Image (cartoon, rainbow, N blue to C red):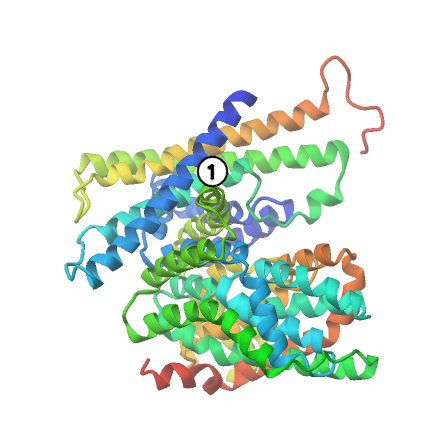
């Protein structure tokens, strides 16, 4: 009976997670224990071991450590300051200018570095003290920094979309990257609208208008960093590179740029490579054990069972998508994005594909959804970094976060129910 | 044990740095041969995949040693004193048990099977068993690190020459 295995898997997973076993191991343990119900010990452990190794045996996944490495080089390479200056030229004159600068810089930086935690610390590290000086409420500044840092996960290049491509069984990375642009910008825009309203009510200042010469200079300064995006995304979309090759080119480009700016030396490289290995290690073990678990789930027909249950609950596609979104929001509050995508893609994707949803669209919806969870307690990596950076307890940032959450949820609903927002750009390029 | 642990930390760290650097150069070489030499290299893609298996699995072990892996630590941080240490020990035992059963035992069997059936890789011609040997190697290292951390917890519980702290919360 499949139901026994499902029960064992779910209970085992929840118990190990709640105990505080690292998520990657909780995933692996649940997979093996479930498999032991229907298989002998030796074949079970050998199969899971093999799935772990073959799960990593992929050229596409190698793009993840490379984008992390390129991001590391960019972080140390003085890129954040240049992008903040560029953002200031673009949106500084709006009411509550510094909040908009933070959001815009996070969108630019997050897309280049591919990490929301890096975006929160690099941009927030500069912007929160500045907002403080200008009389902004510290909690509001931190909340803006935290929420806007997640936009870079949707705007390409984005490692989480590569993880999704893997978990979904090979949805085109180029299509996912193109699909991320408009939803990511929508998120940023909705955060700016809400921040604008708050700024008007609290009478936060505008930044003084820059002279045209300054605007041009800021733009020229940021150009080499923006050019990398063109090489990477343009190269992938035009078919010159695979995502992995593009990520390696990005590493070389970022290294040359950082050396040219004299922000790092060759002797810093081992340290940077080790930092990259650390971040990579977390993602890779999650991928390895998740590949074991998703094989077990397929063996036990778990996606079909969940699908049957959900469709029994509601038949209306709009309602089913709403239920999936609520479930994912709940998952996101206590689980980081990578494991959530790896575990829930194989479960939910077959369901929504039955409803006629494009897998590219679903991937974007899922990532936008899980962005909210990164900013919520009890577990939210960006929330923690943002609060630590601003030097305030989580309780002080909750209230200012609420209107910004509302903006994110509205964006999520638009992304969910307007497929064209995600699919228009990839279709334009023939995906 | 601490000396050994530091030595392993350092060697693993350097090995990861070298493997990661090699992976980047390898893929850049692939781009270079295709676009500049117009003679695409035949082995770079396979080498890249195998490097990733080693980076991923050895990195996983390194991550256990450095306590990098994400966990939901609500329960461990809510507890204190003896209960917290007991829970931490149980967590490490779970990690070690999985790594021993799957990565060491399952991994060794996988290595043995692929070597016995003479499976070699398509482009480079290396036995796949060598590639998969990253599994048992990483498994052994994880068990070692878990054992170190259990020893740490127990050392806190009973400092040498005296009983457990009197105000040990419980």
Question: Is residue B150 positioned above or below A385 on the image?
Answer: above
Q: Pinpoint residue A182: horizontal percent, then vertical percent.
A: 50, 81
Q: Pinpoint residue B75: horizontal percent, then vertical percent.
A: 70, 46
A329 left or right, relative to B26: right
Question: Is residue A222 positioned above or below B92 on the image?
Answer: below
Q: Residue at x 48, y 74 (%)?
A: A364
Question: Is residue B123 positioned above or below A170 on the image?
Answer: above
A102 left or right, relative to A421: right
Q: Which residue is mark 1?
A: B61
Looking at the picture, tell me which residue is in the foreground, A411 or A147.
A147
Q: Quadrant of the C terminus of chain A?
A: bottom left
Question: Is residue A147 positioned above or below B111 on the image?
Answer: below
A402 left or right, relative to A344: right
Looking at the picture, tell me which residue is in the foreground, B32 or A356.
B32
Looking at the picture, tell me which residue is in the foreground, A370 or A38.
A370
Q: Residue at x 70, y 57 (%)?
A: A378
Q: Residue at x 54, y 78 (%)?
A: A216
Q: Residue at x 69, y 42 (%)?
A: B76
User: Is residue A123 visible in this depiction of the protein?
Assistant: yes
Q: Quadrant of the N terminus of chain A?
A: bottom left
Residue B158 falls in image quadrant:
top right
User: Is residue A48 visible in this depiction of the protein?
Assistant: no
**Badge 1 density bin: few <14, some 14–19, many ≥20, Cα 10 Å:** many
Q: Pinpoint residue B24: horizontal percent, then vertical percent.
A: 34, 51
Residue B81 falls in image quadrant:
top right
Q: Pinpoint residue B78: horizontal percent, then vertical percent.
A: 75, 45
Residue A84 falls in image quadrant:
bottom right
Chain name for mark 1 = B
Query: Total of numbered circles in the picture?
Result: 1
Q: Which residue is most to the right?
A: B167
């Amino acid at each position: 009976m499949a139901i026994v295995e499902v029960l064992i898997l779910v209970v085992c997973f929840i118990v190990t997670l709640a105990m505080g076993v690292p998520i990657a191991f909780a995933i692996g343990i649940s997979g093996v224990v479930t498999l032991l119900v229907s298989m002998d010990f030796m074949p079970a452990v050998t199969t899971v071991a093999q799935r772990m190794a073959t799960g990593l045996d992929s050229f596409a996944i190698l793009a993840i450590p490379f984008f992390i490495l390129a991001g590391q080089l960019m972080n140390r390479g003085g890129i954040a300051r240049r992008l903040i200056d560029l953002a200031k030229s673009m949106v500084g004159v709006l009411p509550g200018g510094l909040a908009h600068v933070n959001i815009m810089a996070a969108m630019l930086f997050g897309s280049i570095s591919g990490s929301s935690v890096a975006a929160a610390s690099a941009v927030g590290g500069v912007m929160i003290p500045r907002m403080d000086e200008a009389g902004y409420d510290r909690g509001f500044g931190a909340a803006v920094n935290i929420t806007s840092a997640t936009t870079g996960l949707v705007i390409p290049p984005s490692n989480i979309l590569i993880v999704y491509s893997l978990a979904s069984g090979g949805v085109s990375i180029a299509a996912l990257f193109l699909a991320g642009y408009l939803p990511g910008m929508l998120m940023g825009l909705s955060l700016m609208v809400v921040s604008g309203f708050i700024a008007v009510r609290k009478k936060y200042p505008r930044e003084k208008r820059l002279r045209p010469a300054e605007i041009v200079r800021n733009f020229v300064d940021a150009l080499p960093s923006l050019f990398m995006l063109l090489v990477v995304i343009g190269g992938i979309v035009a078919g010159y590179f695979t995502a992995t090759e593009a990520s390696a080119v990005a590493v070389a480009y970022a290294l040359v740029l950082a050396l040219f700016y004299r922000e790092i030396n060759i002797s810093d490289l081992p340290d940077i490579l080790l930092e990259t290995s650390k971040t990579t290690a977390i993602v890779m073990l999650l991928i390895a054990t998740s590949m074991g678990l998703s094989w077990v789930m397929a063996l036990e027909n778990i996606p079909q069972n969940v699908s049957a249950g959900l469709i029994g609950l509601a038949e209306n596609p709009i309602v089913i998508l709403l239920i999936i979104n609520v479930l994912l929001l709940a998952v996101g509050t206590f689980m980081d994005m990578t494991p959530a995508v790896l575990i829930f893609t194989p479960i939910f994707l077959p369901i929504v594909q039955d409803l006629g949803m494009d897998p590219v669209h679903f991937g974007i919806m899922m990532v936008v959804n899980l962005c909210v969870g990164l900013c919520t307690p009890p577990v939210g990596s960006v929330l923690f970094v943002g609060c630590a950076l601003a030097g305030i307890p989580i309780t002080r940032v909750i209230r200012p976060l609420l209107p910004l959450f509302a903006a994110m949820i509205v964006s999520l609903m638009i992304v969910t129910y307007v497929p064209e927002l995600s699919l228009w750009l990839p279709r334009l390029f023939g995906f | 044990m601490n000396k050994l642990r530091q030595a392993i930390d350092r060697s693993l760290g350097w090995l990861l740095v070298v493997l990661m650097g090699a992976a980047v150069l390898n893929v850049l070489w692939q781009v270079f041969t295709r676009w500049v030499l117009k003679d695409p290299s035949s082995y770079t893609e396979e080498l890249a995949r195998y490097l990733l298996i080693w980076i991923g699995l050895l990195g996983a072990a390194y991550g256990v040693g450095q306590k990098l892996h994400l966990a939901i630590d609500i329960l461990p941080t809510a507890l204190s004193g003896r209960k917290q240490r007991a829970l931490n020990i149980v967590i490490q035992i779970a990690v070690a048990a999985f790594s021993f059963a799957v990565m060491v035992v399952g991994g060794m069997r996988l290595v043995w099977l692929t070597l016995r059936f003479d499976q070699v890789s398509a482009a480079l011609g290396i036995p796949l068993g060598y590639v998969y040997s990253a599994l048992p190697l990483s498994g052994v290292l994880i068990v070692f690190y878990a054992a170190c951390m259990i020893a740490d917890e127990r050392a806190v519980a009973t400092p040498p020459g005296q009983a457990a702290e009197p105000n040990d919360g419980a």
